[in-house]
Amino acid sequence: MTDESIQVPRGASVWSAGMIKLLRTHVEQERGLLEEYQHAAEETDSKALAYLVNLLIEDERRHHRLFIELARSLVSEAELSRAEPAVPRLDFRRADQAALLDVTDRLLARERDDARELKRLRQDLNTMEDTTLWGLLVDIMRRDTDKHIAILKFARKHIKHPDV
């Protein structure tokens, strides 16, 4: 995915033009950071550092994709395009809200169970803190689970109150 197609459309508002430029600049900076991480992972003699940097590379690739999708969506909005933007608009009111709440609540319960299990696992790994990466990996998964819960809470809020 590239950022060459991210151009400010004619007639874009000052705010839209500024945001598109900001996002495009950030995409370029993310690309530079990604290249630096890749170089670090390839050049290090430490398998542990290479492993950790490769985890960061995965995140940076996702960030790069998300910034491009945000920019393309903003371009689509500024062009008054009828095409669906890369980042969809909130459309919860178009779907069966009861079914959406059901699946969201089920997923939220599973993520909360996962959070409890990860907390217990992390406590069990305390003795390995200074000899392995395991505790750090569980900490990362706990943060991911917190993120998943925040995403599902956001969805649930907007499903229940689509006009908020």
Image (cartoon, helix red, strand yellow):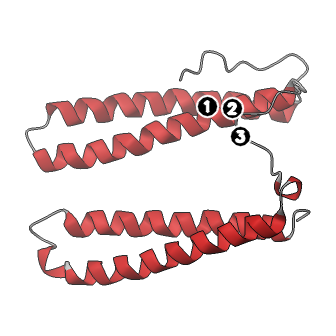
- Spatial separation of the CA atoms under disc 2 and disc 1: 5 Å
Q: Are marks 2 and 3 in contact (CB under 8 Å)?
A: no
Residue under the point 66% across and 16% down? 5
From what the image shows, is residue 16 above or below residue 129? above
Residue under the point 91% across and 20% down? 11
- Spatial separation of the CA atoms under disc 2 and disc 3: 9 Å
Alpha-carbon neighbours of circle 3 within 10 Å: few (<14), some, or many (≥20)? Answer: some
Tell me which numbered mark, 1 or 3, is placed earlier along the sequence: 1
Tell me which numbered mark, 2 or 3, is placed earlier along the sequence: 2
Q: Are marks 2 and 1 in contact (CB under 8 Å)?
A: yes
Residue linked to disc 1: 68
Residue 77: give x, y in percent of width and height: 84, 32
Towards the viewer: 145 or 109:
109
Q: Give the image quarter of residue 115.
A: bottom left
From what the image shows, is residue 124 above or below residue 85? below
Residue 54: give x, y in percent of width and height: 28, 42
The kind of residue tagged 2 is Ala
Report the disc number at residue 150.
none
| Residue 91 in view, yes or no | yes
With 93 as the anchor, is 48 left or right in this view?
left
- Spatial separation of the CA atoms under disc 1 and disc 3: 10 Å
